[in-house]
C-alpha cells in the first residue's frame, strides 16, 4: 500500500494546484464575458448543493466499507471458490471495498499468484472499477434509476464475456502471467 | 430532497450507528477515513463543479449537437469513449459531469460510454497495472474493456430511447 499512498499524496498537491489554475481560468472567462456570470454561478450552486447533500454520506459509506472489509478477507474468500459461486463472489467482493482501481492491483496480483482463475480476477477488477455500491448511489442520484439499472445490467453481462475471452487468451498460450 | 439523497443518507447514518454499537473505535476510524477521503477528493470535486458550471453557462446545445448529440454517429461515441479512458478523475465525479452533458442534449449513449470508459479504463495508471499484473493481462483488460464499454453504451442508449421505458 506504500505505493498507493505515495501516489495519492503527490496527486493531492497536484489537484490543488490544478484547482487554482481552473479557478483562475474561470475568473478570466467571466471577466471577458460578464453577461454569463449569473448563469454560471447559478449552475455552480445547483450542482454544489447536490454534491453537498450526497458526498459526505457517500464518503462515510466508503469509510465504513474500508474498515469492515479488509483486503485479506477478500483474498481469503476469492481464492477459495471456483465456478458460478466464484464468479458471483468476485462480483460481490469487488463491489464492496472502496478506493481507486489501482488499490486493487496488488490484491489482483496476489490472487493470480495464489492460482485464482484469470476470469474471476478480471471480474473482480471490473466490479471494483464500476459496480461500487456508493458509486452507484451517485449514479442513481444524478442520472436516475433507469439509466443506472440498464448500465449495470449490461455491464455485468459484458464483463462476464470479457472475463471468459481474456481467460481464453491465457489458456491458449498456456502462461499464467 | 429526492429519493436517492434520502436513501444514501439513511444508509450512511444507519451504517455509522450500527458501527458505533458494534465497536466505537472502528466507527471513529471509519469517520476518520471518510474525512481523509473527502479531503483527497475535494480539489477535484471543486474543479469538476467549476468545469460543469462554465460548460453549462457557456456552451449551447446547438454548439454540441453536431459533435456528440443525438444525430452524431459512432465517431462521436468513440471520441467520448477515448476521452473517458484518458481522463483521470474519481469515478463518483463522473456522474455529475454526465448529468451536465445530458442537460445539454448529449445522448444517453455518449454519456454511458463516458462513464464506463472513465471507470473501467485507466490510461494514467496503466504503467502501474503492467508492473503488477503483467503486460498481457493489463493490455487485454484495458483494450477489451474499451470495446465492451462502447457496446454497453450503444445498448443503454437504445434502451433509454425506447418508448417502453417512458
Image: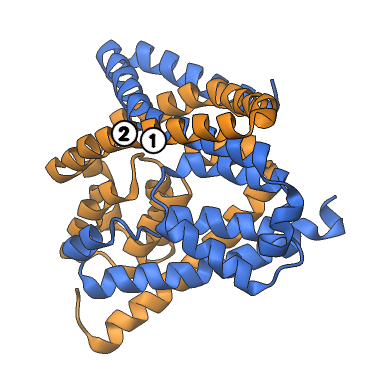
Residue at 29% across, 83% down = A171
| Residue contact between numbered discs 2 and 1, judged by CB atoms under 8 Å | yes
Residue B25 drawn above or below residue A12 = above
Q: Quadrant of residue A19?
A: top left
Residue B107 location (% of width, % of height): 71, 57
- Identify which residue, B21 or A5, lies in the foreground: A5
Q: Which residue is mark 2?
A: A17
Left or right of B6? Residue B36 is left
Q: For chain B, give the colour.
A: blue
Q: What is the chain identity of the residue bearing mark 2?
A: A
Q: What is the chain identity of the residue bearing mark 1?
A: A
Quarter placement of the N terminus of chain A: top left
- Residue B141 visible to an observer of this rendering: yes
- State the SS at label 2: helix
Scheme of image coloration = by chain
Residue B5 drawn above or below residue A109 = above
Q: For chain A, give the colour.
A: orange
Do the dots labelled 2 and 1 sit on one chain? yes
- State the SS at label 1: helix
Residue B131 location (% of width, % of height): 17, 63
**Mark 2 packing: few (<14 Cα in 10 Å), some, or many (20+)?**
few
Q: Which residue is mark 1?
A: A21
- Residue A114 visible to an observer of this rendering: no
**Mark 1 packing: few (<14 Cα in 10 Å), some, or many (20+)?**
few
Amino acid at each position: 500500500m506504500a505505493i498507493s499512498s505515495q501516489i495519492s499524496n503527490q496527486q493531492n498537491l497536484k489537484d490543488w494546484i490544478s484547482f487554482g489554475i481552473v479557478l483562475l481560468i474561470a475568473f478570466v472567462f467571466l471577466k471577458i464575458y460578464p453577461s454569463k456570470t449569473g448563469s454560471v454561478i447559478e449552475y455552480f450552486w445547483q450542482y454544489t448543493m447536490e454534491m453537498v447533500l450526497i458526498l459526505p454520506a457517500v464518503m462515510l459509506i466508503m469509510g465504513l466499507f474500508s474498515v469492515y472489509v479488509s483486503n485479506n478477507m477478500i483474498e481469503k474468500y476469492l481464492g477459495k471458490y471456483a465456478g458460478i459461486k466464484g464468479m458471483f463472489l468476485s462480483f460481490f467482493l469487488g463491489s464492496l471495498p472502496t478506493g481507486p482501481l489501482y488499490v486493487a492491483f496488488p490484491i489482483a496480483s496476489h490472487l493470480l499468484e495464489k492460482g485464482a482463475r484469470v476470469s474471476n480476477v478480471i471480474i473482480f477488477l471490473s466490479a471494483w472499477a464500476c459496480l461500487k455500491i456508493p458509486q452507484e448511489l451517485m449514479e442513481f442520484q444524478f442520472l436516475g434509476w433507469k439509466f443506472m439499472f440498464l448500465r449495470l445490467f449490461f455491464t455485468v453481462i459484458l464483463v462476464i464475456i470479457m472475463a471468459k475471452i481474456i481467460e481464453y487468451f491465457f489458456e491458449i498460450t498456456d502462461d499464467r502471467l | 430532497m429526492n429519493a436517492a439523497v434520502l436513501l444514501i443518507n439513511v444508509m450512511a447514518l444507519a451504517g455509522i450507528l450500527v458501527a458505533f454499537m458494534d465497536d466505537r473505535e472502528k466507527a471513529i476510524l471509519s469517520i476518520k477515513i471518510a474525512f481523509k477521503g473527502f479531503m483527497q477528493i475535494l480539489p477535484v470535486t471543486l474543479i469538476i463543479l467549476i468545469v460543469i458550471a462554465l460548460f453549462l453557462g457557456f456552451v449551447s446545445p446547438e454548439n454540441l449537437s453536431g459533435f456528440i448529440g443525438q444525430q452524431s454517429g459512432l465517431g462521436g461515441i468513440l471520441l467520448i469513449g477515448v476521452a473517458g479512458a484518458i481522463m483521470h478523475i474519481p469515478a463518483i465525479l463522473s456522474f455529475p459531469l454526465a448529468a451536465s452533458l445530458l442537460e445539454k442534449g448529449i445522448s444517453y449513449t455518449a454519456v454511458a460510454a463516458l462513464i464506463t470508459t472513465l471507470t473501467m479504463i485507466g490510461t494514467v495508471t496503466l504503467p502501474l497495472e503492467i508492473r503488477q499484473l503483467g503486460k498481457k493481462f493489463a493490455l487485454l483488460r484495458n483494450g477489451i474493456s474499451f470495446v465492451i464499454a462502447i457496446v454497453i453504451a450503444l445498448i443503454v442508449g437504445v434502451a433509454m430511447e425506447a418508448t417502453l421505458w417512458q
